[in-house]
Image (cartoon, helix red, strand yellow):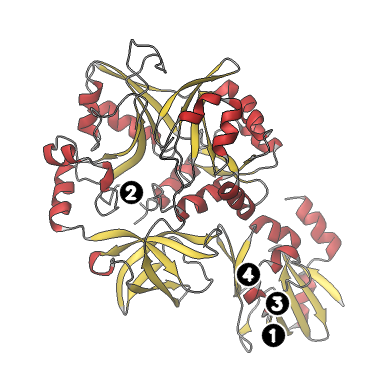
Amino acid sequence: MSRYFTEEHEWIDVAGDIATIGITEYAQEQLGDIVFVELPNEGATFDKGDDAAVVESVKAASDVYAPISGEVVEANSALEDEPALVNSDAEEDGWFFKLRIADASELEGLMDEATYKKFVASL
Amino acid sequence: MTGKDDIATIEEALPLEALPLDAWHRAKGARMVGFAGYHMPIQYDGIMAEHTWTREHAGLFDVSHMGQLTFSGEGVDDALETLLPSDIKGLKPFRQRYSMLLNEEGGILDDLMVSRPGVPGEEGGAFDDAVIYMVVNGATKYDDIGWMIEHLPDAVTMNHMADQALLALQGPEAGEAMAMLVPGTADLIFMQCGPFEWNGVPLWISRSGYTGEDGFEISLPADAAAAFADALCALPQVRPVGLGARDSLRLEAGLPLYGHDIDSRVSTIGADLGFAIQKRRREEGGFIGHARVMQELADGPGAKRVGLAIEGRLPAREGATIYAGDVLVGDVTSGGFAPSVGAPIAMGWVSLPHAALGTALEIEVRGKRIAAVVASMPFVPHRYRRKA
């Protein structure tokens, strides 16, 4: 399984034609205490860059974009009861949704972990 | 119903300035943001933790961005009674009162605290024998100063104390913490104030604040602020708290934030701040904006500032529109998750027929309607120290 990252601080795990998407440790740290996550419905389809989810911290609402195109096959229902899971485990249990990848070539423009780390360090 | 955009524009146009405790905040690990023209700490450990700490112990806030003004000379009380709708002549020495500046149409230019630091010429005064000490909002202070210069007679001298810092210590343990450094403060009750001293530093301390908790606001020379803040934070009850928690605390306390919940387009009565206009002032008038106050007292305001309890977990934020069925009846002016309530809450303006407590309304958030009920404020009971 390979993990990709975006400049919008999302991570994407790819297994076969399914991508699991969440926000990074850096993103949750910047957002602060998360109190609500609005997730997409199963079956929704997104083009790369579409608004896919909204994460509400105590202070503000922030959009989460679809980092690649695809159809939502599952949303993380655990976040409905425990949105703070995004704070405590952003890059594993705090995942947002899974997409059936529409165009695998879109992954090519994304960063690997080492590149993303450098990107964050430069901010 | 918000002047937020105007303030944001000003913030972008001018470079941010540093406040006296800038380096102190950064050393404490604060995340700094632009607010009211200054670099200010939004949070240290996290908004939720800081909010809860303040409700259970004591939080130290830096509010040095606020404008601290003194008024001296002949006829200060008379002059200020033309500018403020509150009873200034009846304000006793060492007492503080909430008031506001109104424009000719009765719109709110700013809300503020006014206090009498003693009797000029007698012992126990402060601020070079000033007649009145006033604290105004940071984002509006220069407009306030301009407005007051225009309307005050020459015999009254207004001084902007740009070299004074202002701290707030808030929470149920604020009293015991403050008494360890400044024992005399133990005798103060809510809205009393007076001059004190700590390690030779003159302090002006009032028992007041903007969180709904017991606590103090402390005016002191900017060059002594870091040492005093360190001394407070060395106490086990005290931790620094940022603007983020200050906002969630004041929202739970039902207190309006200028530029958001109140601004120059709304009036005192609609804003439910009529308590700041004492009976004599209502009857006699003689202040700018009196006509609107009397008209709204007689006929009712067109809309009211209300609290909104929200069903579910999705927060409704500033700018969200409020509906009664298909009819647009108002908008949210402050909103967010309330840590001490454990649910989202909001403050907003709703047209009068829909503003009664218990009225079921809907708020539109990202195209969805969420259920809300007009709720009494404060959302979290005030715990001011009203008796010695």
Report the mark closest to the observer, 1 or 4.
Answer: 1
Q: Which residue is mark 2?
A: B263
| Label 2 CA crowd tier, 10 Å (few <14, some 14–19, many 20+) | many
Q: Residue at x 41, y 55 (%)?
A: B378
User: Badge 4 sits on which subunit?
Assistant: A
Q: Which residue is mark 3?
A: A68
Image mark count: 4
Q: Does residue B161 appear to the left or right of A68 in the view shown?
A: left
Q: Nearest the camera: A43 or B239? A: B239
Q: Which residue is mark 4?
A: A64
Q: Are marks 2 and 1 in contact (CB under 8 Å)?
A: no
Q: Quadrant of residue B363?
A: bottom left
Q: Are marks 4 and 2 on the same chain?
A: no
Q: Residue at x 60, y 84 (%)?
A: A41
Rounded to the nearest angstrom, the CA distance separating label 4 from label 3 is 12 Å
Rounded to the nearest angstrom, the CA distance separating label 2 from label 1 is 45 Å
Q: Quadrant of the N terminus of chain A?
A: bottom right
Q: Nearest the camera: B339 or A110? A: B339
Q: Are marks 2 and 1 on the same chain?
A: no
Q: Does residue A91 appear to the left or right of B365 in the view shown?
A: right
Rounded to the nearest angstrom, the CA distance separating label 4 from label 2 is 33 Å
Instruction: Tell me where residue B3 appears, x and y as whole percent.
Output: 37, 50
**Of pointers 1 and 4, the one earlier in the residue sequence:** 4
Q: Are marks 1 and 3 in contact (CB under 8 Å)?
A: no
| Label 1 CA crowd tier, 10 Å (few <14, some 14–19, many 20+) | some
Label ID, residue B128: none
| Label 4 CA crowd tier, 10 Å (few <14, some 14–19, many 20+) | many
Tell me the amino acid under the disc marked 3.
Ile
Report the mark closest to the observer, 1 or 3.
Answer: 1
What residue occupies the far bottom of the structure in this picture?
A: A43
